Amino acid sequence: MTTLKTALVIDDHPLVARGIGGFLRSHCGFDEVDEVTDTEDVWRLIDVASPPSLVVLDFWLSNNASLQLLVELKAKLPNTPILVMSADGDMVVQQKVFATGAHGFIHKQEAGSVFVEVVSKLLSGKRCFESLTKENLRTAQSKELYVTASELGLTERQGEILGMILKGFPNKRIAQQLSISEQTVKEHVSGILIRMGVGNRVEIITKLRGKRLE
């Protein structure tokens, strides 16, 4: 039985998502491509379909949750290469993507031939961060990278509370610092745990190892 070559494209701009999907079919030999513009649809697709051969993820999603989504995708699809795309030339973006565990990165301005080459490398089991120098890669691996609450899909208030959690503050002290009730803190902590896909504070700290919250 022949295995279908499938892909999942996640980009909140419908025309861009459709264009990437069409290119994967016409130039990269994919049999089926699902184009998703709403992150909620990602999980519905994954739950009912076989794991895709490749995921293409836009870095600048409208809800600024691409890094957290990347973490969740890696956990859900451990054998699927994930390629992140961005129109942003800031090297920090690539470093964040690399440190979070993506398999490759490509600028949206790159030529189609480069895109084909990168996809081919990822499908063969390689990682592809060609514009990162060895020094950049060492920096991404050995130093803390800054992430924002919005990049983790959290509200500003949840970001404040997360910062205190990372400092080891208990709920009571967080409530005192923010002048809110302890019950409200508990509700925010529950929301943080759900959004980050973890079960307790220790898992939060483990997941954010190597990153510093801005």
Image (tube, rainbow, N blue to C red):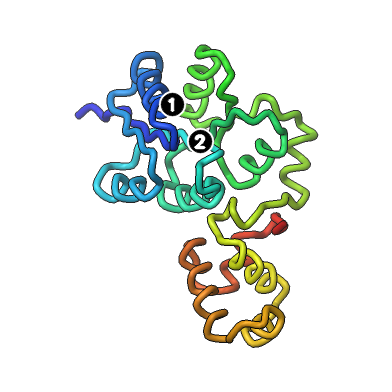
Instruction: Look at 60% across and 72% down and name the residue there.
Output: 202
Q: Nearer the viewer, residue 24 or 29?
A: 24
Figure label count:
2
Label 2–label 1 contact, CB within 8 A:
yes
Residue shown at the point (54%, 74%) measured from the top left: 189
Q: Is residue 77 left or right of residue 5?
A: right
Q: Residues within 10 Å of mark 2 (few under 14, many from 20)?
A: many
Mark 1: secondary structure? helix
Q: Residue at x 71, y 39 (%)?
A: 92
| Badge 1: residue crowd in 10 Å (few <14, some 14–19, many ≥20) | some
Residue 148, label in figure: none
Q: Horizontal and vertical percent for residue 76?
A: 41, 51
User: Relative to residue 71, is residue 91 drawn left or right?
Assistant: right
48 vs 5: above or below: below
**Residue drawn at point x = 56 percent, y = 61 percent:** 155
Name the residue at the front extreme: 179
CA gap between label 2 and label 1 equals: 10 Å
The amino acid at mark 2 is Asp
Rendering quarter of residue 179: bottom right
Q: How far from the left and from the top, in percent, is residue 45?
A: 29, 45
Q: Nearer the viewer, mark 2 or mark 1?
A: 1
Q: In the figure, 38 relative to 94: above or below?
A: below
Q: Horizontal and vertical percent for residue 120?
A: 48, 22
Q: Which residue is mark 2?
A: 58
Question: Which of the pair 76/17 is nearer the observer?
Answer: 17
- State the residue position of label 1: 16
On the rendered image, what quadrant is the N terminus found in? top left
Q: Is residue 48 left or right of residue 37?
A: left
Q: Amino acid at mark 1?
A: Val
